[in-house]
Image (cartoon, helix red, strand yellow):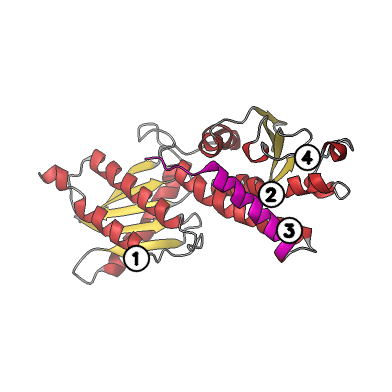
Amino acid sequence: MGREVSESCLESLLTEIVSSYCNGFYANKPELAARRIEAIGFQVGHQLSERYTIDRQRFTDHLEAIKFICKDFWSELFKKQIDNLKTNHRGTFVLQDNRFRWLAHVSVDPSLDASGSIQDPSAMAENKASQATGMHLYFPCGIIRGALSNLGIPCAVSADISNLPACSFVVRIKA
Amino acid sequence: MIVCVAVVGHQNNPLYIQSFTEADDALKLHHIVHCSLDVVDERVNNPKKSGPTLNETFLGLLYPTENYKVYGYLTNTKVKFIMVTTDLDVRDADVRNFFRRFHAAYVDAVSNPFHVPGKKITSRTFAERVSTIVKSFGLNAAG
């Protein structure tokens, strides 16, 4: 029995979460706001992974769990699969989504966008618009981290937005 | 009849344990559950070729004692479900079905935003749902 969630409601909620943490509670501490948003995502991912693995056999290795995230988990969340998965076989995985749903309606002022691509959400102090976009990515990062750690894989997840609305998530598994 | 069910977290921490007997033997049942955790570890680390399919969540009969049979189930998230029954001829399908419903109840309970992961499940709704599942166990077989 599938339950449906209004996409626009969810998107508005996410936008509101980000704006109230960044401009309200932790206006002067973006680091802290990012951590709080990531923690919310972590709990969501933790609970969702419990639910979505209910009819599955146990995973034998990390790759299988990552594939589950890319295919079934992503389909449940975004009605599409991850478009590209890369790995260096040493515990780093790059999950690329060519049209990430939660960024599909984010528009960036073209004059600001000309300043170049941004590599890491934490390293973009100069570009305010991209920084705001990056803030929206801590939540999905937390979801991925929560899901994987519930499956027994401790990891760190960061996001990369070089050309909207494509977006890639970098998963580094802790040895 | 099911006499005891338990949910055990991935660090072998008890999340929920409940016995369903009139007699005062909760301690004995808890002991049986405790012993079965080692069997679960053994099953997972040295899977037998002949046993249930590799990596299946349902682990089958863990071990029989004189009066009880102990069944186990291990989820993807390394949460163990243990069930102790006094029925000596139990159909595998019934047990599978039981664990499936038990797992679904557990998932709903931990999806509660007020539940703290890794802590005991105190939800009354969960307790009621589990006892309904326990009571309905084996009814189909008898009827």
Which residue does the numbered mark 4 point to in the structure image? A108
In the rendered image of this protein, does residue B28 appear above or below residue A105? below
Sequence-earlier tag: 3 or 4 = 3
> On the same chain: label 4 and label 2?
yes
- Label 4 crowd bin: few (<14), some (14–19), many (20+), radius 10 Å: few
| Disc 3/disc 4 C-alpha distance (Å) | 18 Å
**Residue A22, numbered circle:** 3
Q: Quadrant of the N terminus of chain B?
A: bottom left
Image position, residue B77 (x, y; %): 49, 47
> Could you tell whether B39 is left or right of A99 in the image?
left
Q: Alpha-carbon distance for marks 1 and 3?
A: 37 Å
Label 1: chain? B
Crowding near the residue tagged with mark 3, few <14, some 14–19, many ≥20 C-alpha atoms within 10 Å: many
- Secondary structure, mark 2, is helix
User: Residue B70 or A146: which is nearer the viewer?
Assistant: A146
Q: Is disc 4 placed on a helix, strand or loop? A: loop
The answer to whether tags 1 and 4 share a subunit is: no
Question: Mark 4 or mark 2, which has the lower sequence index?
Answer: 4
- The secondary structure that most of the magenta stretch takes on is helix
Q: Using the image, name the chain to which the residue with label 3 belongs.
A: A
Q: Which region shows up in magenta? A: A1-24
Amino acid beneath label 1: Arg
Q: Is residue B27 visible?
A: yes
Task: Using the image, name the chain to which the residue with label 4 belongs.
Answer: A
Tag 2: amino acid: Tyr
Residue type pointed to by label 3: Cys
Q: Please name the residue that numbered disc 1 is placed on.
A: B124
The residue located at (37%, 48%) in the rendering is: B104
Quarter containing the C terminus of chain B: top left
Q: Where in the figure is residue A29, as x and y percent of width and height?
A: 78, 62
Q: Which residue is mark 2?
A: A138
Up the image or down, A10 lies above or below B119; here it is: above
